[in-house]
Image (cartoon, rainbow, N blue to C red):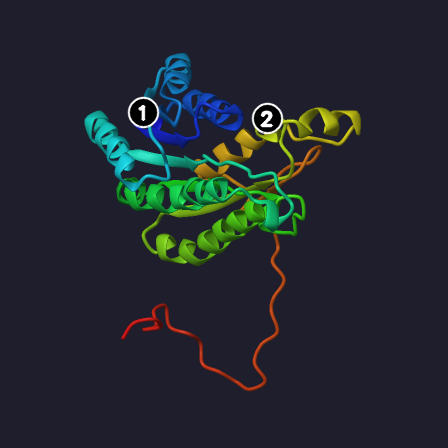
Amino acid sequence: MGTESVAVVTGGAGGIGRETARLLASSGRHVVVADLDGDAAEVVASEVGGTAVAVDVGDVRAWSRVDAVLRRLDRPVDAVVLNAGVALGEADLLEVDLAAYRRIWPVNVDGVVFGLRTLVPFLTRSHGHAVVTASLAGLTAVPFDPVYAMTKHALIGLVRSYAPTLAARNVGLHAVCPGLVDTELLGAARSELAELEFPLIAASDVAAALTSCALGTGAGEVVVCQPGRAPVPYRFAGIPGPGQPVAALPSQLPIGRA
């Protein structure tokens, strides 16, 4: 939609978010950079000529600030990147710090749910696209951080299950699943991986995949991003069916409702 449209990036002050904001700005969008660190968001927003907003994505009340910014800008919102996320870095559930555990779910999962609840009405009016930064941890086992993997599996389930509903409203919903990305989120493991010469993905490469999905030109609904190769759609294997014929399920069932 050119220079009059708006893109929203959460976690916009971090490595992937910052690169994504730059790419979306270069496409002509006014970028709303949302991040827990408001000062860092201001730096990125100033660089790309956008607008910063300090927001804890896991706090549903904080999303009212994003809503207010978009209403004040009064332009179509046609690209959303829900990128905010944290890792836990503990392999043993018996050793997981419960305070950290209670924090990871609001950031990684609630932040996407609350973001979609706030932003889908804007996207519906512009027939735009939303993309979630997931992970290969959402597609495979990750023994060194099972709680993080749990949150990313949840995101893949959400994207695949909610995408048909949004498609009926001409809104695209996607997930990008990178392997290990060369950002500060790796923490102390970054130097260890470097010593092992383990191939890491550049944040700019993940940002390119996210931007393509957000602009509606991505490789598919769930996209895998690995070092040294172009993003590719992930092909989910089918599951064994029942032993007898069944009718197709309707789009809505009263499961869980009295």
Q: Residue at x 37, y 13 (%)?
A: 46
CA neighbours of label 2 inside 10 A, class few (<14), some (14 to 19), many (20+): some
* Residue 221 visible here: no
The residue lying toward the viewer, choosing from 50 and 233, is: 50
Residue at coordinates 53% horizontally, 47% vertically from top-left?
152
Give the image quarter of residue 186. top right
| Mark 1 or mark 2: whose residue is earlier in sequence | 1
Check disc 1 and report its element: helix, strand or loop: strand
Residue at the image point whose x is 31% and y is 44% from the top? 120
The total number of labels drawn is: 2
Q: Which mark is residue 228?
A: none
Q: Mark 1–mark 2 contact, CB under 8 Å?
A: no
Q: Is residue 229 visible?
A: yes
Relative to residue 85, is residue 185 drawn left or right?
right
Residues packed near mark 1 inside 10 Å, few (<14), some (14 to 19) or many (20 plus): many
Q: Is residue 55 left or right of residue 136?
A: left
Amino acid type for the residue under numbered disc 2 = Thr
Which image quadrant: the C terminus? bottom left
Q: Is residue 187 depicted above or below 178 in this figure?
A: above
Question: Looking at the rendered structure, which numbered label has been put on residue 53?
Answer: 1
* SS state under label 2: loop
The residue lying furthest to the right in this view is: 196
188 or 165, nearer to the observer? 188
Q: Where does label 2 land, which residue?
A: 183
User: Which residue type carries mark 1?
Assistant: Val
Q: Residue shown at 67%/44% (left/top)?
A: 144
